[in-house]
Each structure stands twice: as C-alpha cells, then as structure tokens.
Amino acid sequence: MVKRISYCALLGGFALLFSCKNGPTKNHGPIVLGDSSSIVTETDPSKLQDLVTDLNPVIPSSEPRDTMATPPSAPKKGPDTPKKNPVTVAANPTVTLTGPGLKADFNVMSLLIPNVNAKQSGNGNLGNANGVVFTFISGTLNGNLLKVTANVTKVSQRYQSVVVLKNELGMLPIETLSTTTGWEALKGTSNIYRITGLDEKNLDYPEANKNVILNAVTRAAQRHHMSRKKIQQWQNSVHNVRAANQKPLYVMLRSVIWKIDGKDAQGKIFSKQVRIDFPM
C-alpha cells in the first residue's frame, strides 16, 4: 500500500514539472538603452560562437591603381590643309569650227552649218555685230547640223515662207501670201543642233480663198510692172485655185533666222542672230 502511494506521488511530481516548462514565457518588454539589466552576461563559450559562415566579398579599392593602363593618346593632328575650291574653266568662246560650210564668227561665239554655200552680206568682221545676213547659194538646210561653241546654251529657229506661182510664164513670188513663224527651240546635244521643219511639205502658209489668191497674183504682177496682157495671163493661171498650196501655187522658203543665246567667259549673257535669204 505504501509503495502504491509513493508511485502516485512520483507521477504527480513529474506532471507538475512538465507543465511548468511548457507555460508561457514571461515578457520582459523592450530592451532599454543604458539599462544594465538587459546586458547579456552569458559566459559559456559554446553559446557565444558565430553560427553564420563569414563572407569574404571582393570589394575593389576606391583608390586608383598604379598599374592602370594609360589610354593611347590621339594622334597629333597636323595643320589643316586649305580646301581647294573647284575652279570652273570657262569655255573658250573663240573656238574655230573647222570644215566646209556656212561660218559665222562673232568672237564671243562661232557657228558652222556644214556643206552649205552662202554669201555673207555687209562687214565681214562680226566682232561687234549682233547679227549677220547670208544669201543662199547651194547646199541643204533641212536635216543638216548647226554646230556652235561650248558657251551656247540655246538655239532657236524661225522662218518666213512665201507662196510662189509657177507655170509656163515663169515664176512669180506672191509677197502678200507669206507667213512668218514664231521662235522654236532646236533640239541638240554636245553643241550640235539638228535643223528641222524646213522641208516644203511642212512649211506654213496662209489660208486664202479664190478671190484672195486672185487679188494677190494681180498685185504681184503689177509690182513687176507687167503689161495688162501679161497680168491677165497670170490671173488666168489661177482661175480655179482655191488654196494657197494648190498647184500651180507652191510654198517656198524665203528666209531662215537662228537666234543663238549663251554666256561669255565673264558670265555675261549674249544673243546673236544668223539669217539666210533665198533669192527668188
């Protein structure tokens, strides 16, 4: 009986001991700076050891290293070489165009129409002239070339056509039935221009009815001081003509003018004219 009571007392003691250890821990409040009671006074070396492995980061020094490589110095720039401005070489305006043909030399520019024979009128020295007149002798103009010096920038053409009456009596120019065209630029490259539009089929002529044609023929015959009988014969030859290009009327070239524009060596603009007249 005594042993049973002893065992009960012993079990009760153990239960009381475990209940005390699992009880709530007393809160001592926040640590107060300067309070000596909060100072840790543990003296057991095993409990004062660091449980975190020391880190040894490699931190570069903020001081410059003596072995730092010096960046290569930029090559020394020599003295600036002055830029050369492009020099514009003025075309020689006195270039002589060689070969047979109609030639006109104004000193500031020259012109050549190959294989055309014409007689120059007036002063042969064109140095101070603005234009020149030639009388056609032989050769071909339509489809031919007009060559000029390099300082020419534009070549324009105009012409005058006239209606001519041709029959067994001869040839009678009808001066009142004439047409003068406006200026038209010629097409060309490398200072060579093609002469076009001067063939007989493409020449301009005035519109005229039967009465206008008859009156024009009468005035042309009178201007040549023909007799009344002769005038009547010319009139009879166009009695049934109703257009200025109907036979025995023909459209012919009376004169051609070329206007040549350009700049001289000093940049001054010039304009020259060359005219060819066709004798009737």
Image (spheres, rainbow, N blue to C red):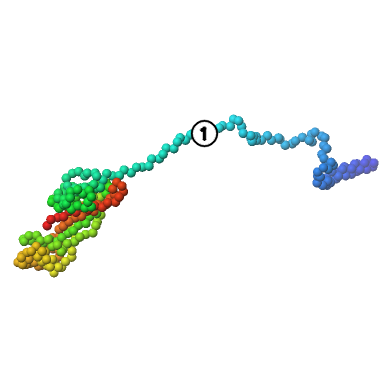
Crowding at dot 1, Cα within 10 Å, few <14 / some 14-19 / many 20+, comes out as few
Q: Percent x, y for residue 235?
A: 8, 66
**Residue 58, picture quadrant:** top right
Q: Residue furthest left?
A: 229
**Residue 85, picture quadrant:** top left
For image coordinates 18% across by 53% down, the residue present is 133
Q: Percent x, y for residue 27?
A: 83, 47
How many numbered callouts?
1
Q: Residue furthest bottom?
A: 211
For image coordinates 23% across by 59% down, the residue present is 182
Q: Nearer the viewer, residue 269 or 122?
A: 122
Q: Nearer the viewer, residue 14 or 195?
A: 195
Residue 272 showing in the rendered view: yes
Q: Nearer the viewer, residue 211 or 91?
A: 91
Q: Nearer the viewer, residue 108 or 44?
A: 108
Callout 1: helix, strand or loop? loop
Q: Percent x, y for residue 195?
A: 21, 52
For image coordinates 12% across by 68% down, the residue present is 215
Quadrant location, the C terminus: bottom left
**Residue 25, picture quadrant:** top right
Residue 241 showing in the rendered view: no
Q: Image height check: is 179 above or below 36? A: below
Q: Residue furthest top?
A: 67
Quadrant location, the N terminus: top right
Residue flagged by tag 1: what amino acid is it? Ser
* Residue at the spot of label 1: 73
* Left or right: 41 in relation to 155: right
Q: Image height check: is 246 above or below 270? A: below
For image coordinates 22% across by 51% down, the residue present is 129
Q: Percent x, y for residue 225?
A: 8, 64
